[in-house]
Image: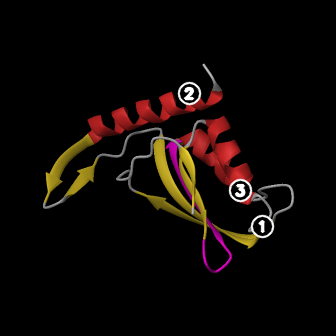
């Protein structure tokens, strides 16, 4: 099994486990019982993070860690990362993001914890 297939399998398993923890639908939204050991975060990374292969290296790191989500450039020059997965693996991606790709210069990292409403099949670069 390739790394990509293993990561996809982990993301699918995580999605199936999240589905088990959803407890009620109410008027188009649903409440989610937070599953111990899993989390979803949104990071906004500022500095010299565009034009330095930051998204590419972020995706490689996320796949290596088995984290699902996406990374994309923002119009203001920042990079947004949404990461979902095992607490420890997501924390490792957060730590990695503080320095980023070899040519990046990270000046600031904003972290926002999110509910587990979104489900990602893998880790993608969004445009």
Q: Residues within 10 Å of mark 1 (few under 14, many from 20)?
A: few
Question: How far, Cα to Cα, is label 2 from label 3?
Answer: 24 Å
Q: Residues within 10 Å of mark 3 (few under 14, many from 20)?
A: many
Along the line of sight, the residue nearer the viewer: 7 or 14: 7
Which numbered disc covers residue 98? none
Give the colour scheme of this rendering.
secondary structure
Say which residue appears at 47% left-offset and 38% top-offset: 37
Q: Residue furthest bottom?
A: 76
Query: Mark 1 or 3, which is nearer the eye?
Result: 1
Whole-percent x and y of residue 45? 67, 67
Q: With 20 as the anchor, is 99 left or right in this view?
A: right
Which numbered disc covers residue 5? 2
- Residue 2's place in the image compared with 87, above or below, is above
> How many dots with numbers?
3
Which element carries disc 1, helix, strand or loop?
loop
Say which residue appears at 80% left-offset and 63% top-offset: 52
Which numbered disc covers residue 97? 3
Q: Is residue 40 visible?
A: yes
Which element carries disc 3, helix, strand or loop?
helix
Look at the numbered discs 1 and 3 and tell me whether their residues touch, using CB distance below 8 Å.
Answer: no
Query: Mark 2 or 3, which is nearer the eye?
Result: 2
For marks 1 and 3, the one nearer the N-term is 1
* Residue range of the region highlighted in magenta in the rendering: 74-85
Say which residue appears at 80% left-offset and 55% top-offset: 101
For marks 1 and 2, the one nearer the N-term is 2
Whole-percent x and y of residue 127? 57, 63
> Which residue is labeled 1 in the image?
51
Whole-percent x and y of residue 8? 51, 33
Along the line of sight, the residue nearer the viewer: 115 or 65: 65
């Amino acid at each position: 099994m390739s790394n990509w297939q293993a990561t996809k399998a982990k993301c699918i398993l995580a999605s199936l486990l999240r589905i088990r923890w959803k407890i009620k639908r109410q008027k188009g939204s649903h409440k989610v019982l937070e599953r111990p050991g899993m989390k979803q975060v949104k990071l906004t990374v500022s500095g010299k993070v565009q034009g330095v292969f930051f998204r590419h290296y972020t995706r490689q790191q996320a796949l290596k860690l088995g984290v699902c989500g996406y990374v994309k450039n923002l119009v203001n020059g920042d990079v947004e990362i949404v990461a979902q997965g095992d607490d420890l693996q997501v924390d490792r991606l957060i730590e990695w993001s503080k320095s980023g790709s070899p040519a990046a210069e990270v000046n600031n990292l904003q972290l926002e914890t999110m509910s587990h409403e979104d489900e990602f099949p893998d880790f993608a670069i969004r445009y």
